[in-house]
Image (cartoon, rainbow, N blue to C red):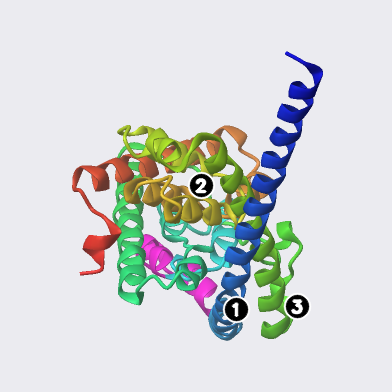
Amino acid sequence: MPAAKILAAGSFLLYYISIMIIDVLLDALLDTLKVFPFLFVTYFVMECIEHKMGEHARNTIKKSGRYGPFFGAVLGAFPQCGFSTAASTLYSGRVITLGTLLAVYLSTSDEMIPIFISEHIPLSVMLEIILIKVFIGIVMGFLVDFIIRRFVKSSTTEVEPEIHHLCEHENCHCEEQSPLHSSFTHSIKITVFILIVNIVLGFIIELIGEDALRGLFTNKPIIGEMVAGLIGLIPNCAASVVVTQLYLDGALSFSAMMSGLLTGAGVGILVLFRSNDNLKKNIQIVGLLYIIGVVCGCIIDLCNFSIEQLAF
């Protein structure tokens, strides 16, 4: 091939790649900027609620006794990472049961609600998804506690733990800031994270195609739930951003998204490994959380649940 043709082909390829990069970056930036106002307003409301009732809610979990899974699941549904971190610390001090800890982990919503609000998902749908997570948290929490009381002998005694500052592992120190400042900080962090996710997904879609990306998970039973469950285990409040965004972009099914949201305990898992010295036990807890999330996701898939059905 003459050198001129090679040069022309190379120039065309560079031009095509440049256009693709610009298109992906612009699309990701525009899509992300649309999200920020909704994120800010949502976080501001949540921070106001957290400042008003946060300590009272944590005390309720501590004093709940055998009814811990119920209160843990209900209070854990509030979309912020505080309850999962507090629950991890309380469990490490043997103040709450394993069932209560798992109930909080399973019901924790983190960033799902702000993302759904920014995408104009109906409020009724969000409430039903939260209720599903709360229901699973309650049932599994009581079931785990029953099995432990019935078949496992425990020699641990209850010790009052030192409750760390919430979100300290992300250095956001929410309790030390005003709701306005804290909500703005959270909004910026999640907006940047969403931008990164959108850019990465944009390039993946350009390279392999939207239909091919969707087919990797949505047409393969269990695989989507297993992958989403692993993503949810990432010890960061933004893990649910990835799961929710993948669902909104069509890469995950509804059941797979639920698996990821069920296993997504935010920084709570990180706090568990830091505050609880029993490494083997911590690994078992994470493994149990993963199994519950994947199995429940598969059951939801078998029941043919979808977000469109929930909307009605």
Whole-angstrom CA distance, mark 1 to mark 3, is: 23 Å
Q: Is residue 190 magenta?
A: no
Q: Which residues are magenta?
A: 56-74
Question: Which residue is more in the foreground, 200 or 262?
Answer: 200
Q: How many angstroms separate mark 1 from mark 2 (CA)?
A: 25 Å
Foreground: disc 1 or disc 3: 1
Q: Is residue 235 left or right of residue 109?
A: right
Q: Residue at x 20, y 42 (%)?
A: 302
Does dot 1 land on a helix, a strand or a loop?
Answer: helix
Q: Position of residue 64 (x, y in %)?
A: 42, 68
Determine the residue positioned at 58% across, 74% down.
Answer: 39
Residue 232 bears which disc, if any? 2
Nearest the eye: 50 or 251? 251
Percent x, y of residue 275 = 67, 49
Quarter where residue 288 is shown: top left
Q: Nearer the viewer, residue 33 or 54?
A: 33
Q: Residue at x 30, y 67 (%)?
A: 128
In the picture of the structure, the residue carrying the numbered disc 3 is 176
Q: Residues within 10 Å of mark 3 (few under 14, many from 20)?
A: few
**203 left or right of 112 in image:** right
